[in-house]
Image: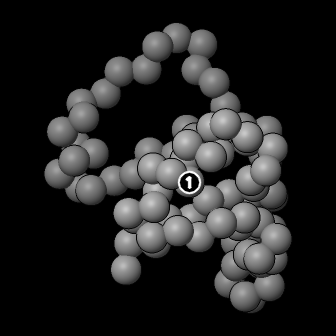
Amino acid sequence: MYIGYAKEPVRYETRLFVQKELDILGSRNALPEDFRAVIHLLEGKKFPVDQAVSLVVPLEEAPDALRSWSENPASFKKIMVSVD
């Protein structure tokens, strides 16, 4: 996870991310205690998922959902793409 902004360009070997099937996430304006609080809510199944996720779509509908989000970002909080 990248937290905050780097002052210089960041370089890394992409092969490592592919081989280990790692995800790269970015975050800003959060403190360690913020992450701990969210993790605690998730572990206790108390995180308000219904309020945080605006739309759940199957993978086939993801392009349309992302297009809608791009055209009107204020209408969405989070879009969850289901790959079941």
Asked if 54 appears above or below 13 in the picture, the reply is below
Q: Kindly indicate the quadrant of the structure image that contains residue 56.
A: bottom right
- Residue extending farthest to the bottom is 44
Q: Kindly indicate the quadrant of the structure image that contains residue 74.
A: top right
The three-letter amino acid code for the residue at tag 1 is: Ala
Asked if residue 65 lies left or right of residue 9, the reply is: right
Q: Give the residue displayed 73% in from the left and 40% down from the top.
A: 72
Q: How was the colour assigned to the protein in this rendering? A: one colour
Q: Position of residue 61 (x, y in %)?
A: 45, 61
Q: Residues within 10 Å of mark 1 (few under 14, many from 20)?
A: many
Q: Which residue is mark 1?
A: 65
Asked if residue 23 lies left or right of residue 8, the reply is: left
Q: Closest to the observer: 55 or 51?
A: 55
Asked if residue 23 lies left or right of residue 13, the reply is: right
Query: Regarding mark 1 in the picture, which secondary structure is present there?
Result: helix
Quarter of the image that includes the C terminus: bottom left
Q: Is residue 13 visible?
A: yes
Asked if 56 appears above or below 29 in the picture, the reply is below
Q: Position of residue 60 (x, y in %)?
A: 38, 63
- Residue extending farthest to the top is 8
Q: Give the residue displayed 61% in from the left and 59% down from the top.
A: 79
Q: Position of residue 30 (x, y in %)?
A: 78, 45
Q: Is residue 3 visible?
A: no
Q: Position of residue 51 (x, y in %)?
A: 82, 71
Asked if 45 appears above or below 33 in the picture, the reply is below
- The image shows a total of numbered marks equal to 1
Asked if residue 45 lies left or right of residue 81, the reply is: right
Q: Give the residue displayed 79% in from the left and 50% down from the top.
A: 75
Q: Give the residue displayed 22% in from the left and 47% down from the top.
A: 18
